[in-house]
Each structure stands twice: as C-alpha cells, then as structure tokens.
Image: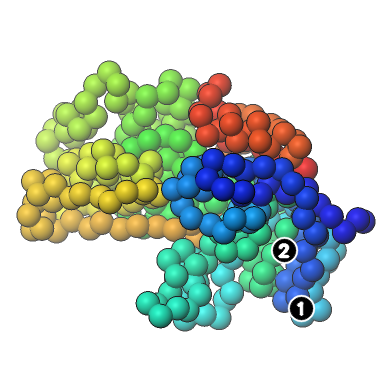
Amino acid sequence: MTDKMKAAIFIEPGRITLGEKPIPDIGANDALLRITTTTICGTDVHILKGEYPVEKGLTIGHEPVGVIEKLGSNVKGYEEGQRVIAGAICPSGYSNACLCGQHSQDGQSHPHGYKPMGGWRFGNTIDGTQAEYVLVPDAMANLAPVPDGLSDEQVLMCPDIMSTGFAGAERGNIQIGDIVVVFAQGPIGLCATAGARLRGAGLIIGVDTVPERLDIARNLGADVVIDYKTADPVDEIMKITNGRGVDVAIEALGTQQTFESCLRVLRPGGTLSSLGVYSSDLTIPLGPFNAGLGDNAIVTSLCPGGKERMRRLMKIIETERLDLGGLVSHRYGLDRIEEAYELFANQRDGVLKVAITP
C-alpha cells in the first residue's frame, strides 16, 4: 500500500478538485476505512458554493461504505476486512450532548457553548469520505457491520440521507393516521416520505415539480402528489384536508418559500419538522404563525448517527421494509468526481444520488 491516496479537496468556493493526500494515520480509538462506495450530498454543494464554511484543503464527503483496513489498538469487536458503514454524524459516545441523548450535537466545546452540528465531522471538521481512505474517529461508537447479502448501493443512503429523512418523520412525532405533507422530493424528502409511511401516517402528500421524483414519491408512500408549478400547493393541501390542515409538515429543501408553505398548511397544534439547510435568514409571517398563539411546534433535525442508528436503518433494508436502491441515478469513479459535482450541483439529467467508487 502506498502512503498517498486520491481525495476530493475543497480549494475555495466554487472549486472542489481531485488531488492527493497522505493516507491518514489512526489513533488508538480510530479505524482506517478503505472506501468502496460514497456519494455527493446537497450539503457538499452548499460547501462548494461557499454557503457553508469549511477549512480550505479539507477532504469533502460524509457518506462512507467500505472495508476496515486497519484498527486502532483500543478498538474491540471488529476485524480487518469487515464491511462496514459509519454515519455522517460520528458521536464520541461520552460527551455531554451524547449523554443527554443528542448524539448528533456532539460538538466541540467553545466560549459560546457547543459548536452547532459538531457531531458532523466527516467533511466538516475532519477529512471526509470522497477519497480512497477515511479515518473513522471513535470507531467503537460508529462502525456498523453491513449485513451479508446487502450491496453497497442498498446501504449507501443509511449514513445520511435515510437517517436525516427518517429523523424528519420521527421529530415530527407522526402518529398513526396523521395527515403529513413533505415539501420537496429530493433524496432527503423522499426518505422523509418513506419514513412517514413507516410511522403509520394515514395520508401523505408529496410536493415537487420533477415528474420522476413525484413518481418515486408515490412508490415510497405518497398518496397524493402536487406539482407546485401547476397548482398552488397551499391551496391544494387545504382543499384535500377540507380546510383542516395537516398534522405534520416536513420541510426538506431549505428555502423561505417552502418553510412558509409548511407553516401555512399546519392545523392548530400541528408540527413543522424542518430538515432544510438554510443559507439565509428565515422570516416567520404573522398570520400563519397565529401571532404565536397556535400551539404549533417548529422542530429541526440533524442526521442522527452512531452504530446503533446505522444498525436500525440497515435492518429496515435487510427485512425489505424499504428499498432505496432506486435513488442512485448516476455512477462515477472517484477519478471523475469533478464531473459528478458539476452534474449534481446543476441538477442535470434527472440526477437524484450519485454513487462514487474509488
């Protein structure tokens, strides 16, 4: 094994390029993972555009599927050559946030409290997964063995997209029989739609404008789909619910318009579950907010991580409760990752998710 590897490196806003880096040295609690498949996330595009700040020179990516190449001296219960995944969020397991049950907020301590999204380390605070190898910190809290018989692409959504989308349904506290709307049917919105079905929603409404995405939304659990370019989704949803509104509105795009639309369709006492990554300030309109008197809840979610979360998600795939393999629309080698970014960032050719293989 040489001491160098290929990696997708953030150079400056507008530039992520393929370069070379040393293969990471691991500590006693870490593991070195040889990446077999990874992918590009919408958050990576925010990084590319300079909308989410990371250090120059950082390897990007946070969705690893791979094989254990090397284990730290303290890591027990795993073996080299084992197929594993790790979540985009890599909790230590022993921080204040973890011990409060908020594993995704396992941040670095600083003068103003925890760093937001501190549990998100790959491609944020440490080198990420769009490379030939990645260091997995706190390996015993984060490595989850892939069940025999499952392919890389079948579990590729577990580290982030599936976990995040499901979190939107879980944090929305969907009850059996609830009416739920999911605004935007990109990969995360589609997983939120699937999560709503698994939670027992009685009626699921999906909103988007891309015909292929609306078709996939139907397959994953949407009972009704609305093309927002041909109809006002707020009006349509209020007609569908006979003026009642929805119990849970999931926002999966990260824009003022979709956030506000979610607020406008909530019943009194309903929940707005926000999954979007916002790149500018949000404004809460007075009317839909009922002047603060509507008993509504606004909750946000960061992708839950850790090995137990990954085990649970892979169990859903293994027992065929859900098949997300269809979300992979394009496949590229790591050598072509700049081309893959150009495709994904510009949402060309009906792209949903891109599988990247070193």
- Say above or below: 276 vs 235: below
In the rendered image, the residue lying farthest to the right is 1
232 displayed left or right of 334: left
Residue shown at 36%/49% (left/top)?
A: 278
Residue shown at 17%/29% (left/top)?
A: 235
Q: Position of residue 72 (x, y in %)?
A: 79, 74
Query: What number of labels is visible?
Result: 2
Residue pointed to by mark 1: 28
For badge 1, the amino acid type reads Ala
Residue shown at 76%/37% (left/top)?
A: 335
Label 2 vs label 1: CA separation?
12 Å
Q: Tell me the crowding category of disc 1: few under 14, some 14 to 19, or many 20 or more residues within 10 angstroms, Cα based.
A: few
Residue pointed to by mark 2: 135
Q: Position of residue 284 (x, y in %)?
A: 18, 50
- Say above or below: 1 vs 245: below
Q: Position of residue 289 (x, y in %)?
A: 13, 51
Q: Tell me the crowding category of disc 2: few under 14, some 14 to 19, or many 20 or more residues within 10 angstroms, Cα based.
A: many
- Say above or below: 30 vs 213: below
Residue shown at 50%/67% (left/top)?
A: 118
In the rendered image, the residue lying farthest to the top is 230
Q: How is the image coloured?
A: rainbow
Q: Position of residue 358 (x, y in %)?
A: 78, 43
272 displayed left or right of 198: left
For badge 2, the amino acid type reads Leu
Q: Quadrant of residue 349?
A: top right
Observer-nearest residue: 44 or 53?
53
57 displayed left or right of 225: right
Observer-nearest residue: 263 or 42?
42
- Say above or below: 165 vs 348: below
